[in-house]
Amino acid sequence: MSDRKIRRKREKDAKKKLAKEIKQKMNMFDKLGDECLACRTSFDKANREMVSTWSVVVRQNEDKVNLYCPTCWSAAKQYVKEISGGE
């Protein structure tokens, strides 16, 4: 096989893999909640600011999507930092 043929096959396989991953993630979007998992603050999917500032944790093994508001997310990060011995 020529180098060109091998390169094309790799690119084609990479595109297929990427398309499959995107499809899986889009299916998980349907499972996105309407509120923060921790404090139950409402989440508006149509609000650009909320979409860009809230944190989404996808657990594919558990087939679960967790949604956290910025306040709860920063509190959780601070807690983890304290537990791990950081400042």
Image: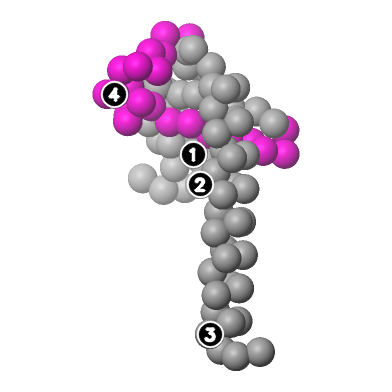
Report which residue position mark 3 lands on: 4
Instruction: Based on the picture, tell me whether residue 66 belongs to the magenta stretch.
Output: no
Label 4 vs 3, first from the N-terminus: 3
Q: At 60% from the left edge and 30% from the top edge, which residue is drawn?
A: 28
Going by the numbered disc 2, the residue's amino acid type is Ser
Q: At 50% from the left edge and 47% from the top edge, which residue is drawn?
A: 84
**What element does badge 1 sit on?**
helix
Q: At 65% from the left edge and 28% from the top edge, which residue is drawn?
A: 64
Q: Which mark is residue 84?
A: 2
Whole-number angstrom distance, CA of label 4 to CA of label 2: 33 Å
In front: 5, or 68?
Answer: 5
Residue 48 shown left or right of residue 84 in the figure = left
**What element does badge 3 sit on?**
helix
Whole-number angstrom distance, CA of label 3 to CA of label 2: 49 Å
Q: Residue 72: x and y, percent?
A: 42, 23
Q: Nearer the viewer, mark 4 or mark 3?
A: 3
Label 4 vs 2, first from the N-terminus: 4
Residue 43 shown left or right of residue 26 in the figure = left
Q: Residues within 10 Å of mark 2 (few under 14, many from 20)?
A: few
Label 3 vs 2, first from the N-terminus: 3
Q: Residue 32: x and y, percent?
A: 54, 22
Whole-number angstrom distance, CA of label 1 to CA of label 4: 28 Å
**What element does badge 4 sit on?**
helix
Q: Residues within 10 Å of mark 3 (few under 14, many from 20)?
A: few
Q: Nearer the viewer, mark 1 or mark 4?
A: 4
Mark 3 in CB contact with mark 1 (< 8 angstroms): no
Q: Which residues are magenta?
A: 40-62
Mark 2 in CB contact with mark 1 (< 8 angstroms): yes
In front: 19, or 38?
Answer: 19
Q: Residue 38: x and y, percent?
A: 51, 17
Q: Which mark is residue 48?
A: 4
